[in-house]
Amino acid sequence: MMSVRGVGWLLLKYAFATGVAVFVAGSSFAGNVTLGMYLSQRQEPTLDQNLTWLDGVYYGLLTASIDLSLDGKPPLFCAPEKMTMTTPKIADIVDRNIARNKGLFHSDWPMGTILLGALKEVFPCH
């Protein structure tokens, strides 16, 4: 039998994941964003869509990472618990990763993969 705390975490986890999915799916930018698309849309008015998409993917990855931890599996990345992640911070992490690895990524690479790699690099699990 699952404890009340366990049920609460489970409900919170699925509510959060559902909210992220609805938020991302509601955006006209919800498809698979490639590096080329991301880099070409760093100007207004598409910049907000770019950042909204990036934020949604970050929280989806965070939710997946927490879910893995709750299941006793290694998380995807280990961001400090007390760190508040803002959209500009997330964009800075991914932009720095792209700049550091110039020439490695192709324009058709999925940004979700690039973001996950950047998060693993910046927030490794020791």
Image: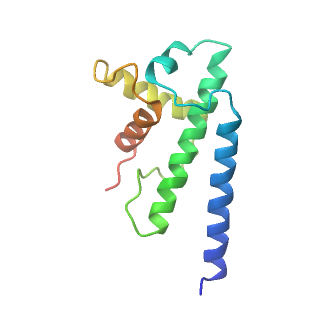
Name which residue lies at 45% across and 25% down.
Answer: 95
Residue 13 left/right relative to 70: right
The vertical placement of 36 against 120, above or below, is above
Task: Tell me if I can see residue 4 in this picture.
Answer: yes
Would residue 81 be visible to someone looking at this image?
no
Question: Residue extending furthest front?
Answer: 31
x then y, percent, for residue 54: 56, 33
Q: Position of residue 1 (x, y in %)?
A: 59, 87
Between 79 and 42, which is closer to the camera in this rendering? 42
Which residue is at the far left? 104
Q: Position of residue 83 (x, y in %)?
A: 54, 48
Task: Name the quadrant of the C terminus.
Answer: bottom left
Q: Nearer the viewer, residue 95 or 30?
A: 30
**Rendered position, 120 above or below 43:** below
Q: Residue 27's image quarter?
A: top right
- Identity of the residue drawn at 41% across and 57% down: 75
- Counting labels gives 0
Name the residue nearer the viewer: 28 or 60. 28
Asked if 77 appears above or below 34 in the picture, the reply is: below
